[in-house]
Amino acid sequence: MNKKKKNANKKHRKTKARLKALKVSSLSKMKKKTVEKSVEAKVEIKKQDEKTTAKKTTAKKTTAKKTAAKKTAAKKTTAKKTAAKKTAAKKA
């Protein structure tokens, strides 16, 4: 059983190494991306931020204070208390 596991692991290691080498070689062949596009995008974003902040400062509104509406208290019905009857204690 150990022999089979050992062989399988060896094959996996070899395959992994081969695939890694393939990946490295293909990445080295790839052309590098130009940096100019990212710089222009950042400049545009900054311009948009400046415009939005300018608009926000001019559009300030004063908030009107609302008076709290008073609620009338609900009438509670008072429960009538019944007088407890006292029983005379019998003397024995």
Image (cartoon, grey):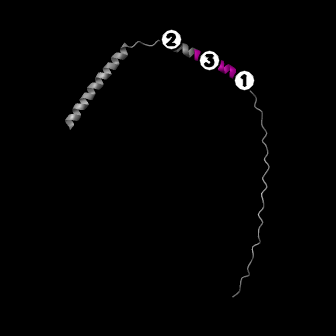
Secondary structure of the residue carrying numbered label 2: helix
Image location of residue 17, percent across then percent down: 29, 24
Position of the C terminus by quadrant: bottom right
Question: Which numbered disc flags the more N-terminal residue, 3 or 1?
Answer: 3
Any mark on residue 48, and which?
A: 3
- Measured Cα–Cα span from mark 3 to mark 1: 17 Å
Is residue 56 left or right of 42 when viewed as pictured?
right
Any mark on residue 14, and which?
A: none
Pick the front one: 24 or 74: 74
Q: Which residue is mark 2?
A: 36
Q: Looking at the image, which residue is at 36% across and 15% down?
A: 28
Mark 2 packing: few (<14 Cα in 10 Å), some, or many (20+)? few
The three-letter code of the residue at mark 2 reads Glu
User: Which of the 4 quarters of the picture holds residue 18?
Assistant: top left
Position of the N terminus by quadrant: top left
Q: Looking at the image, which residue is at 27% across and 28% down?
A: 12
Any mark on residue 59, and which?
A: 1
Secondary structure of the residue carrying numbered label 1: loop
Question: Which numbered disc flags the more N-terminal residue, 2 or 1?
Answer: 2
* Residue 51 among magenta residues: yes
* Residue 19 among magenta residues: no
Magenta residues, start to end: 44-58
Q: Looking at the image, which residue is at 27% across and 27% down?
A: 13
Mark 3 packing: few (<14 Cα in 10 Å), some, or many (20+)? few
- Measured Cα–Cα span from mark 2 to mark 1: 36 Å
Is residue 90 left or right of 17 when viewed as pictured?
right
Question: Which numbered disc flags the more N-terminal residue, 2 or 3?
Answer: 2
The three-letter code of the residue at mark 3 reads Gln
